[in-house]
Image: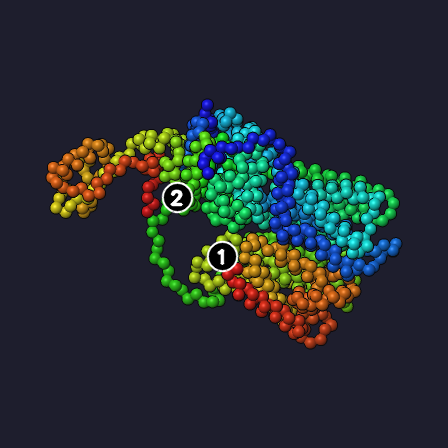
Amino acid sequence: MSVEDRERVRLEPASRSAALPMLTGHAVRAFLRNPLAAFFTLAFPLAFLVIVSTIIGDQTTGHGVPVTQFLVTPFAVFGVAQASFTLVAVDTAVLRESGVLLRLRATPVPPRTVLAARVAASAAIAGVAVLLLTVVGVVAYDVQVVGNKLPAALLTLLLGIACCTALGLALATVTRTVTATQALAQGLLIPLAFVSDVFIVGAELPRPLSVIGSLLPLKHFARAMAETFEPGAGAGFSPGHLAVLVAWTLGGMLIARLRFGWQPRGGAMSRRAAAEVIGPARSSLSAPREPGRGSPAALLGGQISYALLGLRRDPLSVFFAIVFPGLLLALFPSVFGDARVHGLTMAQYLFAGLAAYTVAVTGFVDMPEGVVGARSAGVLKRLLGTPLPFRWYVAGRVCAALIVGLLGVAVLATVGLTFFGVRVDPARLPAVLLAVALGSLCFSALGLAVAALLPAARSLVAVTLGVLLPLCFVSEIFVVGDRPLPGGITAFADVFPVRHLLQALLTATRPDGPGAGFAWGHLAVVAAWAALALVVARVRRSGLT
Amino acid sequence: MATIVVQDLTRAYGSVPAADHVSFSVGEGEIFALLGPNGAGKTTIVEILEGYRSRDSGRVEVLGYDPATGGSAYRARIGVVLQSAGFEEEFTVRELLRLQCGLFPRRHDPDELIDLVGLGDKRATRVKGLSGGQRRRLDLALGLAGAPELLFLDEPTTGFDPAARHHAWDLVSRLRGLGTTILLTTHYLEEAQRLADRVGVLRSGRLQAVGTPDELRAASRLPTVISFGLSPARRAADLPSLSVPPEVDGSHVRFLSRDPLPDARRLTQWASDNEAALSDFTVAPPTLEDAYLALTEEPAHVS
């Protein structure tokens, strides 16, 4: 084609309003192209609704209303928070750090339109999430939409979306990197959900936790939403709760407005470094050292300390792996009192459950995330160019995961033994350590297999955590009541290693149990999963690097 | 009227001046290249012109606007191709171009732009499937979406292989044919020589020189290098007297002449008088690269 062809320029009136729907549609498409985000926002709350409804769905309240009536709104609130808070925060950070915002800034579209489009898209997604939960609730679990409270439900939903979005934007604007945004968003939302009537409804919380919940907006959103699903007369508005949402929305908008930036922030350092004057360069090198005797132990030690160093530089993931389970262990018995679970005190049961959770998270979520991060940053490419055999790198990562897992279990043990009367028979310590070590190896191997099967992924958290959390619930890692789960669910959970690791740990920590506490049958299943995962990771090794 | 007018532009980061009383102007349809080592202030000046960065003092007028306050109306008339701008990897080439074109009131056709940059067969490919060079071409196409009167090109061929570089140069030359004014930053002197009508050389925030590549070379007052091979039968002492004594390395003779024409004439005259063959007789005037290195005072060789 000739140059003249290019002269054909479309001269259309500058329809400023056309940019908003276009950018909104674009943002929604971006969401749909990211199946992991879609899964986390839409399928995840739905999965929880289904799981919890299956477990306790046949119960009714004192007034004869099925409990599922009260299950929809907490999960809906969680879905909205995922879509409007987490997704908006992470998305904004990703677009900023990758330089997409920079390109948009060069167009005549004003900044507020760019932001408005993202907000509109997240609102649409949040709306779909709520609709999905409501429809499934109505169709499958006899949930009743309270017609006279529908306007209140819509207004509450809109205010909740606005509040979450404003705070999501604010979070993105005060962070420097995508990783920090991701970790902070989840790190704030999940603990908050526990103290905000989202994950635990109607519990008597210790006063400090209750106060924290009341100061932050999520609880007000959850309560205002719950009110609109409460069968009965009245319009269902909760002016007090809604006022708090409005206040937080304004606060979030203010921060976002003051701190918003288009420029990538993570790269600022390297750019400054380029401006530095290069000092006088050395003109010769001393003779290279002769090769030393690099023993495998030294190689492995080096790789372990390298992996641990990387973890130390990422305090948020360490917090989640080590401190967070300890907090949960402290929180649950405080909330539920001294209820007994499967014949154990709640703390005793949760100690085993959370130890299994810690081992699974460090091996299956954190470790592969580090490997995948190194892979997408090209670090693994450079490593493959060195004489270091790749298996030593992997071994270093796996051992580091084990060390972090052990630290997490040690924290749990300290909290449990000191404050909650958890008892562990010293004679069964070998059984505990074997279960933890085997579990860590198994989940690390599974994590590596997932990383190898998804060679293009830049982040696995959505997949790994998205698989692990529901599995933890059906495996009874977290307490969901003293009643046994429906047989189908337990049979399903029995296929996967989470439940077997839990059983192995329960056997090893059960105060009244017989023998040395080795549950060989469960340990064998865990070992079989480890072997299978190692084979997959080995066969698909090229996907790993 | 000049497209870009910059007068006494100053911008400092703390005590470090990134732009120190910089003045230049770029005429309509001209391609102007800003050259300089890393940290010389190229990016700062370009970002001020794009309206991304504030200035401490000085006058800046681009297309009749002050970029700092031009807003949407200004952005509708410029195009920016940034080295650091990213893509949404999950979208196809065509989808991204349609979106980008839709953001401008006056715009090119997305499909024509795809053809223009030679991505016709990658139209439906997602960005994550593009090579580095293809990404840069997509980048260029996105920068052209709004049919800009002025295009900012930030190191457009960094990381290109030689063939891709020549393709990109052809592309930029074609843009010149469209009457687009281009402000280019580059590390490649060959690129500046090839594309730019005029060049500005920056060092530590100061504009050292502005002019056509030929003017810069002439102004550098660098000597011309004359070199040739001498058959073993001849001795260097037999050579005619030259403006400077030549350096002889075996059969290879080389000297830096400030008076190249008389020296060359004496040598060729001597050669034909003595029937001596001057193999590989070369008269090399200073290149833009030599002039640039002299202006920015970077050591020519890092040993």
Q: Chain of mark 2?
A: A
Query: Of the numbered discs in the image, which one, if any, rests on residue A380?
Result: 1
Looking at the rendered structure, the secondary structure element under dot 1 is: helix
Looking at the rendered structure, the secondary structure element under dot 2 is: loop
> Percent from the top left, x then y, of residue A159?
74, 41
Q: CA distance from mark 2 to mark 1?
A: 30 Å
Q: Is residue A444 above or below residue B142?
A: below
Horizontal side of residue B45 vs B190, given as left or right: right
Residue sitting at 54 percent across and 29 percent down? Answer: B74
Horizontal side of residue B59 vs B283, given as left or right: right
How busy is the neighbourhood of tag 1: few (under 14 within 10 Å), some, or many (20 plus)? Answer: some
User: In front: A20, or A214?
Assistant: A20
Query: Of the numbered discs in the image, which one, if any, rests on residue A26?
Result: none
Residue sitting at 59 percent across and 34 percent down? Answer: A109
Q: What's the coloring here? A: rainbow
Query: In the rendered image, is residue B38 in sight?
Result: no
Does label 2 or label 1 sit earlier along the sequence?
Answer: 2
Total numbered circles: 2
- Residue B296 location, quadrant: top left
Residue identifier under label 2:
A279
- Residue A157 location, quadrant: top right
Q: Chain of mark 1?
A: A
Horizontal side of residue A121 vs B204, given as left or right: right
User: In front: A473, or B264?
Assistant: B264
